[in-house]
Image (cartoon, rainbow, N blue to C red):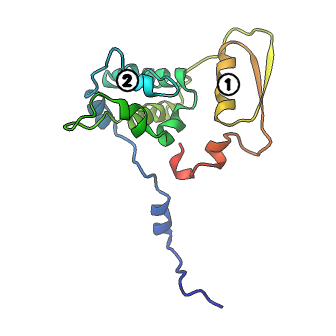
Amino acid sequence: MENSFCTPLDITQIEQNFAEINRAMTAQEAMQEASRCLYCYDAPCIQACPTGIDVPTFIKKIASGNVTGSARTIFDANPIGASCARVCPVEVLCEGACVEKTLINKPIEIGRLQRFATDFAMAAGKQLFHAGEPTGKSVGIVGSGPSGLSCATYLARLGYAVTVYERRPEAGGLDTYGMAEYKMP
């Protein structure tokens, strides 16, 4: 029996269905948005960020043209900052706490600025951290999800020889197998 409710989609429709929801900022848009930030001393956006990213610092670096430095600030606090820039509910976390969020102004687009900086560094192939002086000790990490990869990064920075064990064919855990592909870098 043929289902009359199903109609095939052409390739253009399929591509549109899986296109990124939020487009990336251009360099000009990022500079303009970064210049709106007040660079608060006791920034509520930092307090609202579960990973403690120094938001005013990374935004100030974008505003000054130091996008690699901005990405380094992000990745120092959060090794999976590129993924978080896309899936983090910023409207209730950092952007929700932004002092620019008033009746007149909208909050700084922190998530999109974070995406701009991390995408820039990844596209340029920048190595943003180095392994620490070897300690002679090794550590095994079970699972290559976001927490496993973050743990491996921090331990490598401290000089441990890290081996990550994963039962699935690809690393990434939830980022690879649980998130819609069009949301991820």
Label 2 secondary element? helix
Most foreground residue, 96 or 112: 96
Give the x, y percent position of residue 75: 53, 25
Residue wearing tag 1:
151
95 sits to left or right of 101: right
Near mark 1 (Cα within 10 A), the count class, few <14, some 14-19 or many ≥20, is some
Q: Residue furthest bottom?
A: 1
The amino acid on which the numbered mark 1 sits, given as a three-letter code, is Cys
Label 1 secondary element? helix
The residue lying at 47 percent from left, 62 percent from top is 17
55 sits to left or right of 166: left
Most foreground residue, 122 or 105: 105
Give the x, y percent position of residue 53: 47, 23
The residue lying at 28 percent from left, 34 percent from top is 101
156 sits to left or right of 60: right
The residue lying at 58 percent from left, 27 percent from top is 79
The amino acid on which the numbered mark 2 sits, given as a three-letter code, is Pro
Name above or below for residue 103 compared with residue 5.
Answer: above
Near mark 2 (Cα within 10 A), the count class, few <14, some 14-19 or many ≥20, is some
Q: Residue furthest left?
A: 104
Give the x, y percent position of residue 22: 40, 48
Residue wearing tag 2:
44
Give the x, y percent position of residue 155: 69, 18
Quadrant of residue 151 within the rendered picture? top right
Q: Considering only order in the chain, which callout, 1 or 2, is on the residue closer to the N terminus?
A: 2
The residue lying at 31 percent from left, 18 percent from top is 40
Nearer the observer: mark 2 or 1; the answer is 2
Quadrant of residue 161 within the rendered picture? top right
Name above or below for residue 98 compared with residue 10.
Answer: above
The residues tagged by marks 2 and 1 sit, at their Cα atoms, a distance apart of: 26 Å
